[in-house]
Structure formats: structure tokens, C-alpha cells
């Protein structure tokens, strides 16, 4: 702070070219100005001003120092102006961590109107899985994260914003021709073919309903547990999952862990797993008949309603989860982050 005062006096003397005028501008005495200049010259080990009866003039060394001091004070003025705009207009910066799927299907809806209301707030997006987003949050590399509900680090606040449901989907063609895809072209029992791959004539019902009609009736069927009419056993969905190509997210992912736990609890052992790093790709791959995909129903609603993919009925649904915003309880929330939290009502 002392050196800042010395530089301020030096800068004023250089601008006015007169010690008495500088003293008047700084509201201090002339001896105090002269003392400050002498002290700065002693510390620099050189003469900064040539003195005369008309005033003072910068030496060569003084001009070099003045150029740096001038730029420094200009930067300080710009910083002060930026702070004033920040306070008046709500300027700021928010760093948000989120997966690609959560960004597309949830975060964009929040950002769309938030940016319109606060156009001066800069928003940075770091796309990572929930696990990596929590690591960034812990290391203070982001301000807030949109994540799937999971075990949270200490002092992390989690505010859920919606429920999501994991389901299994495939195209109607894939399920209709499942018997042609079985390993070594093994034929299914005759009773399976006559009643449809999914017991209860599910496959034949799929053939009956075109994409443009009876969709509500088909969705009602999907939401009901399907049982074999002869034995009362659960549907053939387990068999379908075990013998088909099951497309899932990569490991070390909260969603993958959740689905893996369900499969283990239901004693479902899949023969062929295809790992994909993006939920939207899973939906697309299922739509073109590459296999059965584990997806979030809310993220695949458009494809489900259009009939591009069909939800497989489960006698035991996968436990629902939540998605929400997480931020550190210890961190000091910036004005921008607080505005975002208030806007999202979290």
C-alpha cells in the first residue's frame, strides 16, 4: 500500500509537472510530495525528475517508470469500471458442469430464459459425467453442477428439479425379428413364435399398430406388466434382454451403475453388451434396430411417441431417480451464481 501511494504521488507530479500543483490535487503538503519523490528515487537508485524553477521534468529513467505506472493506473480504472457495471447490470460468470444429455434435455430449458433475463452474465459449460462433475465441484473448478442423484461429497448441497425413469427400448422391427438374431440361429419354441416374442402377444400387437394410430393403447400396454397367459410367469423381457445386444452407457457412470444394479437384482445376465458414451446415441442406435438400449424415458419421449422405438414392459420397473443441481455449501456464492440459483428456484 505504501508503494502504491508513492506511485500515485509520482504519477500526479509527472502529469502536472509541478510539485505544488500535485500537492493541491492530492490534498497533501508540498514537503510531503517532495519527501515521497525522494524516497522513491532512493529505492529506485536513480533520479526520476530534473528540477528547475519552472517545475519538474521526467528524466529518461523517470519516463520509463511513468509508462508502466500509467498503464497500471489505467488497468485499475478499468477494473473499477468493470465492478461498477457488474453491480449495476448483473455482470458475472457462472461455470456449470453437466453431462451432454442432461445439458440437452434439461439445462437448456433453464438457460434459454435465464440468458434473456441476464444477458450480461457469462455462462461456461463443462460437459462431464456426474462423477467427474462432482470432482470439478469439489476442486472449485465449477460453481454448480447438474447431476443425477448419487452419493455426494461432504458439504455439497443437492436440489432435485425432476424425476427420471430408466427403461429399455428397441425398434419394433428389432423385437419382431428377434428370433432371427438369436445366437447360432437357434429357433425359439413354437409357442413363443405363435404368441409373439413377448408373452401376451406383445410382438404381434406391435405389428398391428402403425406408427400413426393407437399409440395411446400401445403405451398403456407398455406400462402394464406382461405375463405369460399359460403359466402366469413374468414376461419374456428377461429372455429378450439376455439374448439381445444390450446397449448401455460406459462404466464409471451413475446411470450405468443404476441399470447394472437393476439387472443384477433381477438376475438378468446379458450375453452381449455394447457400450456407448452418449445417451442420445443410445436412442438413435435403438431407433435403427441395433439392439435394445437402456435410456431415460424423459429423454426419449419424442421417439417413443412417434413409434421409432418401443418401451419394453417390465414386471418390476427400474427404480426412479432424480436430477438436480449441486453446489458447495462452503463456497462463497457469487452474485451471478446466486441469481442463477434464485432463477431456477433451487
Image (cartoon, helix red, strand yellow):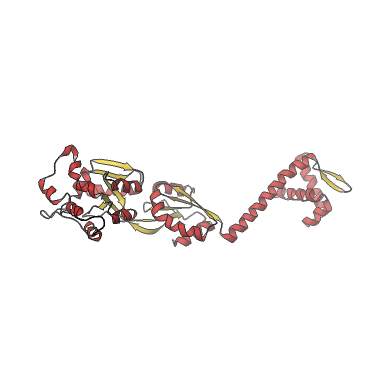
| Residue situated in front as seen by the camera: 170 or 330 | 170
Report the quarter where the C terminus lies: bottom left
- Where does the image place residue 345, in percent across and percent down from the top left? 44, 62
| Residue situated in front as seen by the camera: 87 or 152 | 87
Regarding residue 156, the answer to whether it shows in the image is no
Q: How many marks?
A: 0
Query: Left or right: where does residue 208 sit relative to residue 134?
Result: left
> Toward which corner of the image does residue 247 lie, by quadrant?
top left
Query: Left or right: where does residue 309 sit relative to residue 67?
Result: left
Regarding residue 178, the answer to whether it shows in the image is yes
- Where does the image place residue 163, in percent across and percent down from the top left? 34, 58
Query: Left or right: where does residue 64 sit relative to residue 119?
Result: right
| Residue situated in front as seen by the camera: 52 or 332 | 52
Query: Left or right: where does residue 336 sit relative to residue 313?
Result: right
Residue at the top extreme? Answer: 184
Above-or-below relation of 273 to 9: above
- Where does the image place residue 159, in percent across and percent down from the top left? 41, 58
- Where does the image place residue 10, in percent across and percent down from the top left? 77, 48
Q: Residue at left 69%, top 46%?
A: 71
> Toward which corner of the image does residue 319 lie, by quadrant?
bottom left
Amino acid at each position: 500500500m505504501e508503494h502504491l501511494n508513492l506511485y500515485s504521488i509520482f504519477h500526479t507530479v509527472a502529469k502536472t509537472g509541478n510539485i505544488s500543483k500535485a500537492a493541491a490535487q492530492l490534498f497533501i503538503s508540498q514537503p510531503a510530495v517532495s519527501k515521497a519523490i525522494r524516497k522513491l528515487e532512493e529505492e529506485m537508485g536513480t533520479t526520476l525528475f530534473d528540477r528547475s524553477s519552472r517545475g519538474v521534468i521526467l528524466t529518461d529513467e523517470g519516463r520509463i517508470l511513468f509508462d508502466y505506472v500509467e498503464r497500471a493506473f489505467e488497468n485499475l480504472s478499468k477494473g473499477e469500471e468493470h465492478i461498477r457495471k457488474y453491480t449495476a447490470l448483473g455482470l458475472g460468470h457462472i461455470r456449470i458442469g453437466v453431462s451432454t444429455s442432461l445439458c440437452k434435455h434439461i439445462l437448456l430449458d433453464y438457460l434459454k430464459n435465464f440468458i434473456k433475463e441476464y444477458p450480461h452474465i457469462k455462462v461456461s459449460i463443462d460437459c462431464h459425467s456426474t462423477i467427474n462433475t462432482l470432482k470439478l465441484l469439489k476442486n472449485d473448478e465449477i460453481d454448480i453442477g447438474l447431476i443425477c442423484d448419487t452419493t455426494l461429497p461432504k458439504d455439497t448441497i443437492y436440489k432435485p428439479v425432476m424425476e427420471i425413469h430408466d427403461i429399455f427400448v428397441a425398434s419394433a422391427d428389432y423385437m419382431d425379428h428377434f428370433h432371427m438374431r438369436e445366437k447360432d440361429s437357434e429357433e425359439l419354441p413354437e409357442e413363443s413364435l405363435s404368441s409373439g416374442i413377448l408373452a401376451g402377444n406383445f410382438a404381434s400387437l406391435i405389428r398391428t399398430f402403425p406408427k400413426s394410430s393407437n399409440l395411446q393403447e400401445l403405451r398403456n400396454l407398455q406400462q402394464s406388466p406382461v405375463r405369460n397367459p399359460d403359466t402366469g410367469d413374468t414376461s419374456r423381457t428377461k429372455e429378450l434382454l439376455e439374448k439381445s445386444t444390450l446397449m448401455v452407457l460406459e462404466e464409471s457412470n451413475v446411470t450405468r451403475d443404476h441399470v447394472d444394479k437393476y439387472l443384477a437384482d433381477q438376475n438378468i445376465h446379458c450375453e452381449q453388451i455394447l457400450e456407448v458414451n452418449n445417451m442420445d446415441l443410445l436412442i438413435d442406435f435403438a431407433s435403427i434396430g441395433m439392439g435394445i438400449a437402456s435410456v431415460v424415458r424423459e429423454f426419449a419421449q419424442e421417439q417413443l411417441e412417434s413409434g421409432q422405438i418401443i418401451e419394453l414392459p417390465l414386471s418390476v420397473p427400474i427404480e426412479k431417480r432424480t436430477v438436480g443441481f449441486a453446489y458447495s455449501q462452503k463456497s462463497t456464492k457469487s452474485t451471478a451464481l446466486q441469481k442463477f440459483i434464485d432463477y431456477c428456484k433451487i
